[in-house]
């Protein structure tokens, strides 16, 4: 395959993971960050707000990763980060039609009674931020060849929020179903889908990127507590273990494209993550 031109629109943590794969292939990789001038080695960096960049600052490319992080979790923050950015890319690239891979979220599924969700499930009405993600997916799909990559809860190196919560005195909230995916597998899935798209493989317009193990939140926390050697801060009520909300997400559509998870379960992922966390603490 001849070298391609790739734009990582939102070159943060996930973008930094993606970039080396395409650089090693010999592709030309551009990256955009809202602020900061540090980019992965080999990436041609662009600093600025995508919605404010002139056309000549947005390079001609064959594929775009849209990986945004909102400034805050309000509807306004989501619209600015996702929908408005997508509209600017549509304006710039509708004439040339590059493939776009949009990192969305499984939060678009408003179902929350323990339902099983697969790629054919129609999202239920949901909170405003999730509706904006769906609106962004729809706008992109109408204007450009696009794939929405709906990620569940991403964990991995440096993502220690769950660990610190388990270590705190905070009483655990009501149990619920949760879906996890390791950051390493998110990066791999994005590269896998891009590789297929660039090779002309016909793909679906969205995929659920989540591991093989939907699980109750308390089960995850109990695993972490055991690995950390701390007490589980749960009510003494056996009925409380029954998840009261959430959903269970099926990843078969992604696996049918030939993708295999390196971390098919939260257990192997958190075993490694807890060790990294403890190693970092020991250095402080």
Image: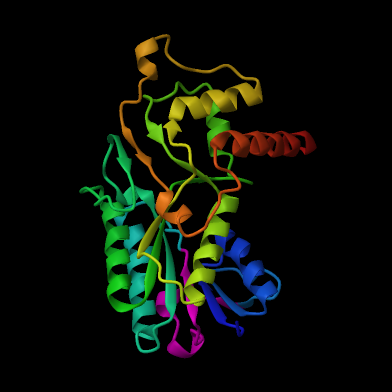
Name the residue: 31% across, 26% down.
Answer: 244
Image quadrant holding the C terminus, namely top right
Query: From what the image shows, is residue 168 above or below residue 179?
Result: above
- Could one spot residue 151 in this view of the protein? no
Identity of the residue drawn at 40% across and 71% down: 202
Please say whether residue 46 is one of the residues in the magenta stretch. Answer: yes
x, y (%) of residue 196?
A: 50, 70
Horizontal placement of 70 versus 112: left or right?
right
Q: Position of residue 38 (x, y in %)?
A: 66, 69
Which one is in front, 14 or 12? 14
251 above or below 247?
A: below
Q: How many marks?
A: 0
Residue 68 on image: x %, y %: 45, 63
Vertical placement of residue 210 versus 242, above or below: below
* Nearer to us in this view, 93 or 72: 93
Residue at x 36% of width, y 64% of height: 204
* Quadrant in which residue 78 is drawn: bottom left
In magenta stretch: residue 9 = no
Is residue 222 among what the camera can see? yes
> Seen in the image, is 188 located left or right of residue 143?
right
User: Based on the displayed image, in which of its 4 quarters is residue 100 positioned?
Assistant: bottom left
Tell whether 147 sits left or right of 157: left
Colouring scheme applied when the structure was drawn: rainbow
Q: Where is 275 relative to 10, above or below?
A: above
- Name, please, the residue furthest toward the right: 283
Q: Is 87 on the left or on the right of 282, as rendered?
A: left
The magenta region covers: 45-67
Q: Quadrant of the N terminus?
A: bottom right
> Which residue is at a point 33% across and 67% down the rendered structure image?
83
């Amino acid at each position: 395959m001849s070298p391609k031109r790739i734009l990582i629109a939102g070159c943060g943590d996930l973008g930094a993971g993606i970039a080396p794969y395409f650089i090693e292939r010999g592709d030309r990789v551009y990256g955009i960050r809202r602020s900061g001038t540090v980019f992965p080695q080999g990436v041609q960096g662009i600093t600025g707000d995508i919605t404010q960049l002139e056309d000549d600052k947005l390079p001609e490319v064959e594929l775009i990763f849209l990986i945004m992080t909102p400034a805050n979790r309000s509807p306004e923050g989501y619209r600015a980060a996702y929908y408005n950015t997508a509209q600017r890319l549509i304006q710039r690239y509708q004439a040339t039609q590059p493939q776009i891979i949009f990192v969305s979220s499984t939060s678009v599924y408003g179902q929350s009674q323990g339902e099983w969700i697969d790629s054919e499930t129609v999202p239920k009405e949901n909170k405003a931020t999730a509706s904006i993600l769906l609106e962004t997916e729809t706008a992109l799909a109408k204007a450009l060849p696009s794939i929405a990559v709906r990620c569940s809860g991403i964990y991995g190196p440096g993502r220690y929020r769950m660990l610190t919560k388990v270590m705190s005195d905070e009483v655990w909230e009501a149990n619920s179903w949760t879906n996890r995916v390791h950051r390493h597998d998110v990066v791999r899935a994005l590269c896998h889908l891009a590789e297929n798209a660039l090779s002309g493989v016909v793909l679906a317009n969205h995929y659920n990127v989540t591991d093989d193990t939907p699980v109750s939140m308390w089960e995850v926390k109990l695993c972490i507590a055991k690995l950390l050697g701390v007490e589980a801060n749960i009510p003494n009520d056996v009925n409380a273990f029954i998840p009261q909300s959430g959903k269970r997400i099926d990843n078969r559509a992604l696996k049918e494209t030939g993708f295999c998870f390196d971390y098919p379960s939260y257990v192997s992922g958190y075993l490694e993550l807890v060790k990294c966390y403890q190693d970092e603490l020991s250095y402080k």
